[in-house]
Amino acid sequence: MNQNPKTSKQTAKQKLYKIIFEADTQKGKAFDVVLIIFIICSSLVVLLDSIVSININYGAILFALEWIFVIAFTLEYVLRIYCVDDKIGYMKSFFGIIDLLSILPAFVIFIFPSAKFLLVVRILRLLRLFRIFKMIRYVEESNVLMKALAASRQKITVFIFTMLFIVTVVGALMYIVEGPDYGYDSIPQSMYWAITTVTTVGYGDISPGTPVGKLIASILMFMAYGVLAVPTGIITYELSQVSKKNVAEKACPNCGIEGHSPGSDFCYKCGEKL
């Protein structure tokens, strides 16, 4: 009895899907190991290629290696699209975009050699390790962080405008008090000094020289300790609120009990999958 070609094709597609997207089988684990090696090696090629001395002496070798990786990643990208049912959904997904960005610069530069600045985008290949290592819990935690940032955006916006007001006023004062003799050539230049001071960076390229200027700088430095704690406190509060909300919403579909941690996969009471 002849095997249905359509059934055979679907079976081969399913097997390929398990190898590429899952790591439960021996072939799937081997695929992930090879892919990890390729990602790390290709990232090293990008880093080494940015060193002028190495690029001059081994540029041809690095170029050849880069295209080997590009061809391999392109083939993998095509196979991933072939395996999934929702092809457009995969291409629009986070990892689908990362997969595309890991190979697209090479083809763009091949057509437009002047677009060499796109080479730095290749380092995004390292992000693909998140999928290979199945770091879902870290992705979930990043979602919690993004929710907290979104919830605190209004407070952060007020904080940023307040800081802009402070550095503008202090910058104008320092421009008047210090002047060009001490490097405060303009108000924007004085604002730059105020920003580096209030953020405690303090490059030291500009510093006050008059007693009044030093007094203003001292007051701004004392303010910086309290100012820097404001966004940290806002985000920390929103993180705790989002975490509490996630814990409260995580209820077991079998027994209905709540209080599971965001990373829980099974109910702590009945063992049902959440």
Image (cartoon, rainbow, N blue to C red):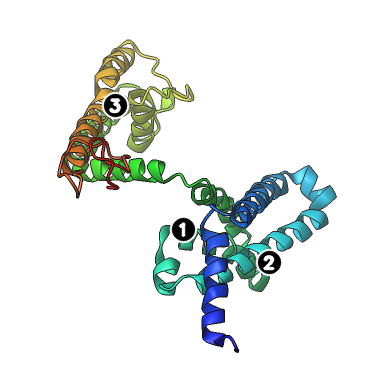
User: Mark 1 or mark 3, which has the lower sequence index?
Assistant: 1
**Residue at 34% of width from left, 44% of height from top?**
140
Q: Is residue 173 left or right of residue 179?
A: left
Q: Position of residue 142 (x, y in %)?
A: 35, 43
Q: Which residue in the structure is indicated by mark 2?
A: 71
Which of discs 1 and 3 lies nearer the camera? The answer is 1
Find numbered disc 1 in the image and state the secondary structure of the residue it sits on. helix
The residue that label 1 is drawn on is 95
- The answer for how far apart the CA atoms under marks 2 and 1 are is 18 Å
Residue that sits furthest to the right in the current view: 57
In percent of width and height, residue 154 lies at 17, 43
Please report whichever mark, 2 or 1, sits nearer to the chain's N-terminal start: 2
Which residue occupies the extreme top position in the image? 211
Going from the N terminus, do you reach mark 2 or mark 3 first? 2
| Amino acid type, mark 2 | Ile
Mark 3 lies on residue: 176
**Amino acid, disc 3:** Ile
* CA separation in Å, label 2 and label 3: 61 Å
Q: Residue at x 57, y 61 (%)?
A: 19
Crowding at dot 1, Cα within 10 Å, few <14 / some 14-19 / many 20+, comes out as some
Relative placement, left or right, of 54 versus 1 is right
From the viewer's perspective, is residue 6 above or below residue 270? below
For residue 40, above or below residue 239: below
